[in-house]
Image: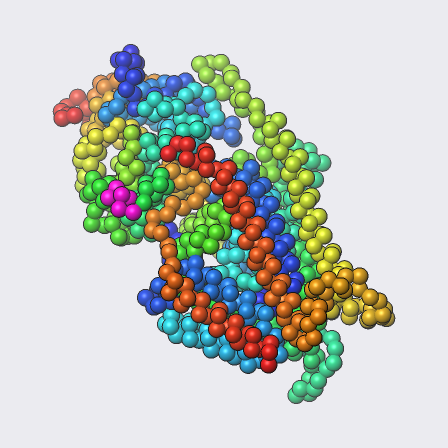
Amino acid sequence: MGSVSDLVNTASLEVSGLAFAYPDGHQALFGVDFSIARGERVALLGPNGAGKTTLVLHLNGILSGGVGTVKVAGLPVGKEHMAEVRRRVGIVFQDPDDQLFMPTVREDVAFGPAAAGLRGPELEERVDRALGRVGMAEFKDRPPHHLSFGQRRRVAVATVLAMEPEILVLDEPSSNLDPASRRELADILRSLDVTVLMVTHDLPYALELCPRALILSEGTIAADGRTAELLADDELMRAHRLELPFGFDPRSVTMGA
Amino acid sequence: MGAGHAHRLYRHGHSAVHALPPHTKLAAAFGFVVVVVSTPREAMWAFGVYAVLLGVVAYAARVPAGFLLKRLLIEVPFVAFAVLMPFVAEGERVEVLGLSLSVSGLWGAWNVLAKGTLGVAASVLLASTTELRSVLLGLQRLRLPPLLVQIASFMIRYGDVITDEMRRMRIARESRGFEASGVRHWGVLAKSAGALFIRSYERGERVHLAMVSRGYAGSMPVIDEVTASRAQWSYALALPVAALVVCVLGWAL
Amino acid sequence: MHVPDGFIDAPISAATGLVAATAVAVSLRGARRELDERTAPLAGLVAAFIFAVQMLNFPVAAGTSGHLLGGALAAILVGPYTGVLCVSVVLLMQGILFADGGLTALGVNITDMAVVTTVVAYAVFRGLVKVLPRRRGSITAASFVAAVLSVPAAAVAFTLIYAVGGTTDVSIGKVATAMIGVHVLIGIGEAAITALTVGAVVAVRPDLVYGARGLQRKLKLRVDGELVDVPDTAPVAAARSHRKVWITGLVASLVLAGFVSFYASASPDGLEKVAADKGIDAKTEKHATSDSPLADYGVKDVENARLSGGLAGVIGVGVTVVAGTGVFWTVRRRRTADVSPAGTSGV
């Protein structure tokens, strides 16, 4: 972790000593520490039940009450700055149907900025820009549930981009996508100039998009380093129940990122 | 998942009534019902005029009579009560077709039937020309406390979620060979209620988290301002005002 | 039990409207403490659930309809204040969308189905939970009893309102027998559903059951192998619960006061009938409040009987509307005043 300590001053996201138990007694996080610099794309890997979703929900203060701190661009996540923190941290949830709840694509994308107080032409301009960035501008007046799954996920990304976040957090962005939609989403994510934290089981996708990866296992960060190196470490992978798809060799992949 | 923007009570259309801002329609419907209820039951002709007024609204909204009448069926339990009233009520009695009926019971039955039916018809017209979401926006505009609007909007969203989950659970039950065919199976169905509750909650919780993550803090952000022009207000209020004239005449005559 | 327009006369509709508006206003204040970010959707779900169960109408012997009420479920899952709000919202939406229950009868409907059920159920529930051993089974048992009692309580409340302001003179005896008899049966069905639902939720997500909040274990966090206690929040909750009991009592007494005073003052038709049946000549006695401007539903100094009765109705309805708006307006303004500093600080 020494490699990132000098970046702390400009960190988009800084998590230290985070521990949390649910009200039913189940403890999910046991002291999580990491930091992500501005503009980085980082993958958060880990087996089911490692606490990934719990961690994500701490990033914008939906869960709190344990110990430790989370800072977004230097701003501590807590009651007093909640509105600003939520504007800065954009979370794209796993199921786009949970994220899209308004009658039209336009209203859904406008929801966040409107909640922050934007109105009129300014709001309209924000919506158009966000939809343009994910290539969904022509679907503006369609109901979200009439779109394909891949399109819905792109709209979900747009709803978050419309808030112009400091950091984009994606929960399993590639799940349930066909290969073409998967590639389209990858192109979109690469074209964005925001910090990205991508929570995923999809190791090839992580390798394709994120130069750096964290492994969350049993509620703590078990490894932090270059994605290609982590994926190539068979022993580490086995220890944390991470498996590459059949026939995939991270050493044979060349990356542009 | 449907987001609750269309409901089966709503009848899609582009009539002048559909186009009115929701809060003017809510105010008009409420005003109308208040006037109807304050009309003396002896002024029978007034209720006829009210019915004609509603008929005019239904015509303007292009709501077919069949649709309206079918929706009026919700009243049936109270119609049954009204029908019984002349038999059970006390007081002076009259002979009609060999039956002994109470005079005050007859008046009571008429009162409940006439006012109830007009009230139901007004609500049906309101619901069939106003989208659910607009109803909520209208209530918000009429300064219903935000917490109530919030509960109502979650309720409507959850309505869909519950129906969805209920269907899935029924499919799961039936594919394991269970069929509810009698009292013995009530236990299974009742236990499903608990499971349904938790499943629906957890699904709705995720939607809520997504909303909160985008800055939702208890009231729906205003994306398109709902405003009503003076002309729209006067158009909507024509109904209760006309009814009020009838009502005043009903008292005076 | 949904009362349609024109079933209860205007003054009593107005009076219950006032009671309902007060109860809702008090609940709005109380609910701010019960509801947090995570429980707000729960209130919506409870409302949707109640909406669904209220749609199941049973035909009732005397011709009225009966159905599950859901007030007990709401009070136990989301707390009494939020419970009142949930059921009120259900009744409001039913009135607007499904024409189930008249718009002018909202006050009557909210008073008997939202306020009485929740208050009775929650009072019984709290009482039992205090007495019974602190176990999950007790929560389920207490919910059963609370629900069983809450439904006939609503039927009694309805009968009282009917006795005071019914527009038809079916004797209260008949109405009471039919309503209470049937609702004792419905209460059992209601209790079964309430207990099963609460039981299922307590077993899986005890954090979602307001009435079971006292049962939660104290949490520990393991940080680097050391055990760290979660900061204790219990004293705050205890201080609040006193207030809650106090306010619940206040609401209950308000409701009771409303009923009793009308029962005593407005000389209801049905009651007179009973008095006459029993050989008591009610007319020889002067009513204590016959000097009040709305006594006997007629406005003083107005000669035409029909006109004066009608004026009373209109004044009554007008008072409700004004009072209701006033209460909502004050609460709203206070809410926004409370909320705005926090809400704008971050933007």
State the residue lying farthest toward the front. C301
Quarter assignment of residue A36: top left
Residue at position x 52%, y 52% from top? C89
Q: Is residue C27 magenta?
A: no
State left or right for residue A34 relative to residue B74. left
Residue at left 46%, top 16%? C223
C252 shown above or below B253: above
Q: Is residue A241 visible?
A: no
Q: Is residue C128 left or right of residue A207?
A: right
Which image quadrant: the N terminus of chain A? Answer: top left
Q: Position of residue C134 (x, y in %)?
A: 66, 32
> Residue at coordinates 50% horizontally, 39% vertically from top-left?
C337
Residue B48: x and y in percent read 52, 79
Image position, residue A256 (x, y; %)? 13, 26
What span is colored magenta in the figure?
A: A120-126
Look at the picture and state if B190 lies above or below C243. below
Residue C274, by quadrant, is bottom right
Q: Nearer the viewer, residue A151 or C194?
A: A151
Task: Report the front residue among B94 and C228.
Answer: B94
